[in-house]
Image (cartoon, helix red, strand yellow):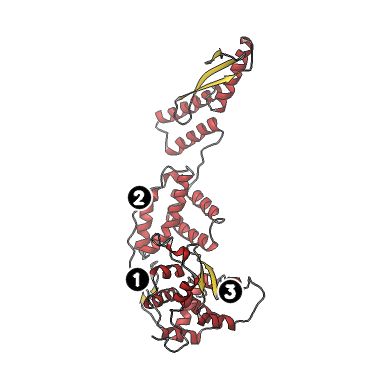
Amino acid sequence: MAFTLQKKDGSPFYYVHFRYPSRETGEPIRVSRSTKERTKSAAWAKAAELEKAIRKEYGCDQETNSVLYAILSRACGDATKGELNEAKASEYLSEILQATSGKPLARFTVREWFTKWLEQRKSEVAKSSVARYRSAINCFLDWLPEESQSKNITQLTTGELREFRQSELEAGLRPQSVKTKLKPIRSALSQAVKDRVISFNPADSIDTIPADKFEKDVFSPCDLRKILSVASPEWKGMVLVGYYLGPHIQDASNLLWRQVDLSSRTISMKRVKNGKAIKAPIHDDLHDWLMEQESTDDPEAPIFPSLRGVSVGAYSVGLCAQFSSLLETAGIEGRVEEAKTEGGKGRRRKSLGFSCLRHTFNSAMANAGVGQEIRMKLAGQSSNAFNDIYTHLDHETFSNAVHAVPSLFQEGGDE
């Protein structure tokens, strides 16, 4: 026994004093507890019980020490024979944690950790985001050799991640696309650091690739009228929403009637991409189209029934593909940049798409003298510099800005 008994002034009871090593630092921690006993013989027995219980709780009792000694003896034996590798060392560490804390070391293979992270994200982000993350991570896992997928996540190296990035670039993928693909991989490893599964994030050492520039174009009023002349009723509304409100294509296609207030002539929107909310004024042209639509008493009814929930990028049937087909029907052509490598991963890029309605909306307001702060607010863009300025801008300011965008149906719309 390594304790002492002592009576304190003013107390009829004996106190037990002993020390045990801290789990974090190894430094001795002094314990002083009352035995609640008045005689030394009774206090001695109670002190022994207290010391044993506390030492067991903190993993430093004689039984635990014996278990730890046996584990370390086996580890030393393997090391002496040259058989102590990283896998065995991890097993011994897990045994030590089990003996001292009751919980083994949390161990994951590379594939297991990324699968676990994706499952966690299902309840935290939109389904489309999870699908995008899964695509990127599966691409990385498919690139890794089978033995590397099955190794402990602690063994994943910066070199492997850098090689994966280079292979994607050599396959024709553009820098911005590679950066997008690496983002969920980096996030999953960052979470592993937070959960103390790994000690550092091997993706942190990978430098950002400078993005190649490909300028988007804007639509002229003449182009927009051509598009509207061949568009279906729903796509006509989508084009007007894109031109007069500047949302992303998914935000526009998922609009519900409860978001529209025709009496105050506003539409409440929340950007999927950054979560920013805005109550935007409705331009006269868009107001007229909304008034022409069949009325409904269901506030949850979609404004664009056939487009709501449709994937943005699904080949041939996605929203972007449908809009490209609409441009082709209208005879509107933009610049096209082909994939960099024949049969590679690089995609064709077009200078005209639905996102260009957003650029056109912003450019039209800029040409009309609308300030950058207001344009950014209406477009749902983020800016640290103007973050607080937007808060108190009134509805009239926004309304004037939106109505500065030229009408497509009134004289002077080409100006």
Q: Is mark 3 on a helix, strand or loop?
A: strand
Is residue 288 shown above or below 359?
A: below
Find the residue positioned furthest to the right: 297
Is residue 29 shown above or below 280?
A: above
Q: How far apart are marks 3 and 2 (CA)?
A: 50 Å
**Would you name the residue on which mark 2 appears?**
205
**Would you name the residue on which mark 3 appears?**
261
Q: In x, y percent, where is residue 369?
A: 37, 76
Q: Which residue is drawn at 46% across and 27% down?
A: 72
Q: Are marks 1 and 2 in contact (CB under 8 Å)?
A: no
Find the residue positioned furthest to the bottom: 411
Q: In x, y percent, where is residue 87?
A: 45, 39
Amino acid type for the residue under numbered disc 2: Ser
Q: Distance between the residues labelled 1 and 2?
A: 27 Å
Q: In which quarter of the image is residue 185?
A: bottom left
Q: In this view, does 200 lie to the left or right of 126?
A: left
Q: Which of marks 1 and 3 is nearer the N terminus?
A: 1
**Would you name the residue on which mark 1 appears?**
214
Q: Residue at x 50, y 27 (%)?
A: 68
Is residue 83 shown above or below 359?
A: above
Q: Which of 358 and 111 is in front in this view?
A: 358
